[in-house]
Amino acid sequence: MRNPTHTNPLATVRNLGILAHVDAGKTTVTERILYATGTTHQRGEVHDGTTVTDFDPQERDRGITIFAAAVSCTWDGHRINLIDTPGHVDFADEVERSLRVLDGAVAVFDAVAGVEPQSESVWRQADRHGVPRIAFVNKMDRAGAELDAAVASIRARLHPVPLVVQLPIGAEDSFTGVVDLVRLRALTWTAGDAAGAAEAAHEGSVPDGLREEAHRRRRLLEEAVAELHPGALEEFCATGTLEAGTLAAALRDLTRSGEGVVVLCGSAYRNRGVEPLLDAVLAYLPSPLDVPPVRGTHGGDGDDGDGDERERERAADPAAPLAALAFKVNATATGRLTYLRLYSGTIEKGDTVWDATARRTERIGRILRVRADRHAPLDRAVAGDIVAVVGLKSARAGSTLCAPSAPLVLEPPGVAEPVVSVAVEARRGTDTGRLASALARLVEEDPSLVVRTDRETGQTVLSGMGELHLEVAVEKIRREQGLAVDVGRPRVGYRETVGRGVSGFVYRHVKQDGGAGQFAHVVLDVEPLDTPDSAESGSGSVFEFRSAVVGGRVPQEYVRAVEAGCRDALAEGPSGGHPVTGLRVTLTDGATHVKDSSEAAFRTAGRFGLRDALRACATVLLEPVAEVTVTVPEDAVGGVLGDLAARRGRVTGSDTRTGGAAGTATVTATVPLAELFGYATRLRSRTRGRGTFTARPTGYAPAPEPSPASASGSASASASGSAR
C-alpha cells in the first residue's frame, strides 16, 4: 500500500502515538517499527531491557513504560515522529500531554484480552482531543487469540465502527500472515526464531482455503464503508462493489473524521504485521496538512503589545509566524531539554522566540531530532515537526513559544488533580536543601506532581496520580541525586472542640517582682458554638468572643486584651495539643488594680485562663473529612460501598447512569481524610482500573472513641492526595 509522491513536504509527515493498556505490546510494536524502518539494526526486547524507548533504568527494571518517549524514523519516503506512551493508569498525564500534540494514533489491543480497562481510558482521552486512530490487534500468535472477539470488544466497549481490513492466515501458533481485504492479496512471513527474526513479508494470492471467506469479509467491509461514506455509497449503488482505490480513500476519510476505525492484526513480537501497519499509518492517518489550523488567543506583550485576546488561527505553514507548544521537559543537572511541537513557522539555531506563557524572550541554543535518549543535531525545524531544543530557561510543559512580532497563546494540556500523597524528608538534615531542589526539578518535568509544605505539621508533602507514580518519583530522586529519602504517610491536622462547657471559671493573674506588678482578674464562661459551621468548618478556626461585663469593672481596652489572650490559647488544646475551634468565650466579670493592671496582664490572664478552663471542659477531638465522589461500573457498586463503610465513610448519595454496554454509578460519601491513604490503588484493584474518584476537603467531624492518644498529631495518620 504505497502513497503517491507529494509536492508539499508536510504531507509526508506523520505525528503518531502508540496507545494501549499496560502489557498489550506498545513498546514491542514501537521497537519493531524502528527495526522495520531501518532506524535500529537489532530488535529490542522489553524482558531483556534492551528497548530504545524504555531507556530509563526504572522502566527496564519494572518492564513497563513510565515516561513518554519520542522517536523519529522514515518509511516509504515519509517521516514518522512517534511517541510511545505509558499504559499504566498512574501515568495517564503523560498520555494526556502527548495526545495534545499528536495528529494520529495507533491503539494496540491484546488479541486474547481485547479491550482492557486502561484501553478504555486512553481511548476516551483520544476522543477528547479528537485524535484519529487505527487499531492494531496484537499477539495473534498467542493461545486463545481471536480477531473477531477482540473486534467485538472494541465495538461494545469503545463504541466506534470497526472497519476490519485484514483476515488472519492461521491462528495462534500457526499464525503466519494476513489477507489484505482492500487489495485482496495475501502477506505472509516465514517462520523465524523466538526472538522474532522473521523475514520480510511475501506478497501473493489469497490461499484457496481462505478465498471464499476473504470475499465474504471484503463484502462486509464494503457495505460498512458505504453506509458511512457518501462517495463510496454512490459507487456501491452504481456498480455493486467498491474499487480498491475508492475503498482506501473512503477508509482514509472515515478514519480522519472519526466515523470509523480501521482494524489490522499481527504479532509484533514475531515481526508479523508491522509493515502493513506502517502502510496503514501513511494511508489513513492525517499529516499536519490534514488537521485543522491550530487555534490560540493573541498573547499580547509582544512587539506590538496590543493586548488583543481574540482567537486566532495558524495554519501548518513553515512561512507563517512561529507557533509551538512545549509538551515535555527533561530537567537534568547539566541542562534542560524541552520537547516542542511546531504548528506553524520555522525555528533555527540561535533564534530568539517569545514565551507567551511566561511573557519573556528565550533563545534557541540547539535543535535536536529525538530518538528516545539519543539525539541528532538539526539546523532548523519547520511546522509539523516534533523536536527537542536546548537553551530554554523558563518554558514548562504547556508553554507556548511564538514569534515576538506575532504573539499567540495555545491551550496547554490539561493537568489532572493528584489523588495520593506521601510525606518526604531527607534522612540527613544537611540534605534538606538538595531535596528541595530535586523536588522542584521533578515538578518541572511532571506537572501532575505537586509539592507543598503543610503549614500545621511542617511536613513536605508530595502528591501524584497514584502510589506507583510517587514510588517512581522518589526512586528517581534516590538514583539521580544520590539522596537518602524517607517516605511516610502525611500527618493529618486534627482539631479539638468543646463538647460540654463551664460557667463562671475564675482566673487571677498576680505577679509582683519588685517593680511594677501585674494584676488581672477574669471570669469566663466557655460553651460550644452552636452554629452549622462549628464542628465541620472548613476553616477550622471558628471562635466567638463577647463581653458581658457591666459597670466598667473591666475597661474596654482590657477586654480586647483578654480576647487576644484567648485567641493565643486556641493554638494548643488540652487533649493532644491540636488547635481548638468551635467555641464561644464570654467575659462575665473581672477586676483591676489601680497601678498593676495593664493590657499585657489581661492578655496573659486571657491566655492562661482559657487554657485552664478548657481542661475543665469536656473536649472532643475532630478529624478532617472529605467529600468523595466515586464513579465506577454499575457491577462494582457493592464492593465500593463495602470499602467505603470499612473506611468509616458515610454515604450521602448515589446515582446511576445508563448508556453503552454497561451503566456507571456515582457514589458520594463523606470519609475521614486519614482513611483515604491508598484508596486510589484499592479502588483501581476492585474495579480493574475502571473506577475513578475525586475528593474535596469539607471540614471536620468528631473522631471515634478512643481517639486522643491514638490519633494525636504526632502519629503517622494517613492522608490521601485529596487534601488539595
Image: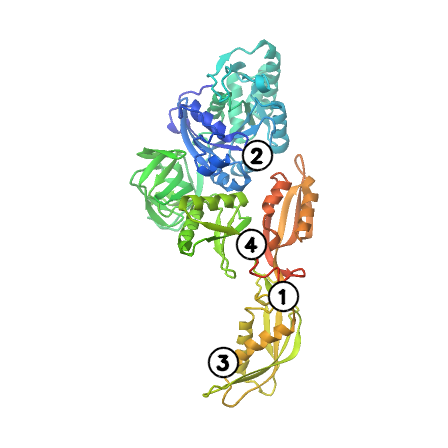
At x 52%, y 33%, the residue is 19
Which residue in the protein does label 4 denote? 723
Q: Which mark is residue 534?
A: 1
Q: In the rendered view of the protein, which quadrant contains the C terminus?
A: bottom right
At x 62%, y 41%, the residue is 685
Which residue in the protein does label 2 denote? 119
Identify the secondary structure beneath mark 1.
Answer: loop
Q: Please state the horizontal and vertical placement of residue 717, each as a whole percent of the image.
A: 58, 56
Above or below 384: residue 147:
above
2 or 3: mark nearer the eye? 3
Q: Amino acid at mark 4?
A: Ala
* Alpha carbon separation for disc pair 2 and 3: 67 Å
Q: Which of marks 3 and 2 precedes in the sequence?
A: 2
Q: Please state the horizontal and vertical placement of residue 105, each as a whole percent of the image.
A: 50, 31
Residue 360 relative to residue 469: left or right: left
Q: Which of marks 4 and 2 precedes in the sequence?
A: 2
Q: Amino acid at mark 1?
A: Ser
Q: Amino acid at mark 2?
A: Ser
Identify the secondary structure beneath mark 3.
Answer: helix
Local packing at callout 2 (Cα closer than 10 Å; few below 14, some 14-19, many 20+) is many
* Alpha carbon separation for disc pair 3 and 1: 30 Å
Q: Quadrant of residue 556?
A: bottom right
Of 19 and 248, which appears nearest the observer? 19
Q: Please state the horizontal and vertical placement of residue 521, each as a whole percent of the image.
A: 57, 84
* Alpha carbon separation for disc pair 4 and 3: 39 Å
Above or below 9: residue 430:
below
Which residue in the protein does label 3 denote? 600
Q: Are marks 1 and 2 in contact (CB under 8 Å)?
A: no
